[in-house]
Amino acid sequence: MENALLIGLSRQMVLERQLDVTANNLANVNTNGFKSDHALFEEYLRSGAHEDNFVSRDRAVSFVQDRGTFRDDSQGAVQITNNPLDVAISGGGMLAVQTAAGERYTRDGNLHLNNLGQLVTSAGDPVLNAAGAPIVFQPTDHDVNIAADGTITVLEGTSRADSIRGKLRVVSFASAQQLLKQGGNLYAATEGAAAQVDSKSTVQQGYIEKSNVNSVTEMSNMIAISR
């Protein structure tokens, strides 16, 4: 009897975990650059009773164990914004940003300038250049251009010559699973994981990457879990 209760409880615990993951995906369907998560579980099956006096013979007994979650890092849809400071990254790269907790990484390219002239994320975190320092604009800068390799040039004042304001620090990791979600659309590198300059990814100016969550799929999952 006790084993039967544990088996039933194992399934309920996994369903609760799946529900949490699905609900979080749906809550972030409109979050720029968000990557959906999916629950992983392992099911152990064994045959039930073999005696003739049981009503249902050979009924499988199932024990389910939560194995964690995996992240879907596929590219989200790209949407035009016409904001010259917005960027979308094509490929597996991420923008490096400076936070109070140290360097973090994001796919959210909805950028603007703060009152210090620094290029920052929607949360106010400074975006870093190739040298690991904030990218700073001058008050007279205009006609911002961000090249595919992340190089930022402007026209300053009445000058007709381009001035370079830096190059976006776009990085990647040996494995995408070396990055852990930390909230606020940020990722942190796991211990021992080193960020490498990503020369394969390209930057699209005036666009942002949307969430890769499929709302129809997630709603269907929610209904199935709730049954």
Image (cartoon, helix red, strand yellow):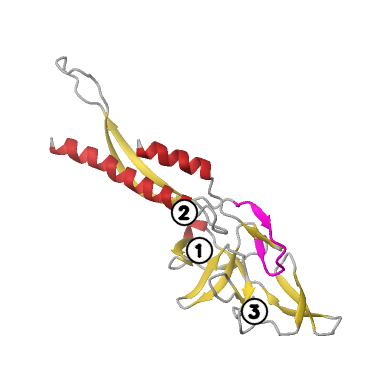
| Residue 76 shown in magenta | yes
Mark closer to the chain start, 3 or 2: 2
Mark 3 = which residue? 135
Q: Identity of the amino acid at label 2? A: Ala
Mark 3–mark 1 CB contact (< 8 Å): no
- Residue 83: horizontal and vertical position, in percent? 70, 66
Q: Is residue 99 among the parts visible in the rendering?
A: yes
SS of the residue at dot 3?
loop
- Identify the main secondary structure in magenta: loop
- Residue 174: horizontal and vertical position, in percent? 54, 60
| Residue sitting nearer the eye, 209 or 192 | 209
Mark 1 = which residue? 185
Q: Identity of the amino acid at label 3? A: Ile
The answer to whether residue 1 is above or below residue 74 is above
Residue at point 43%, 53% (across, down): 24
Q: Identity of the amino acid at label 1? A: Asn
- In the rendered structure, which segment of residues is drawn in magenta? 75-88
| Residue 111 shown in magenta | no
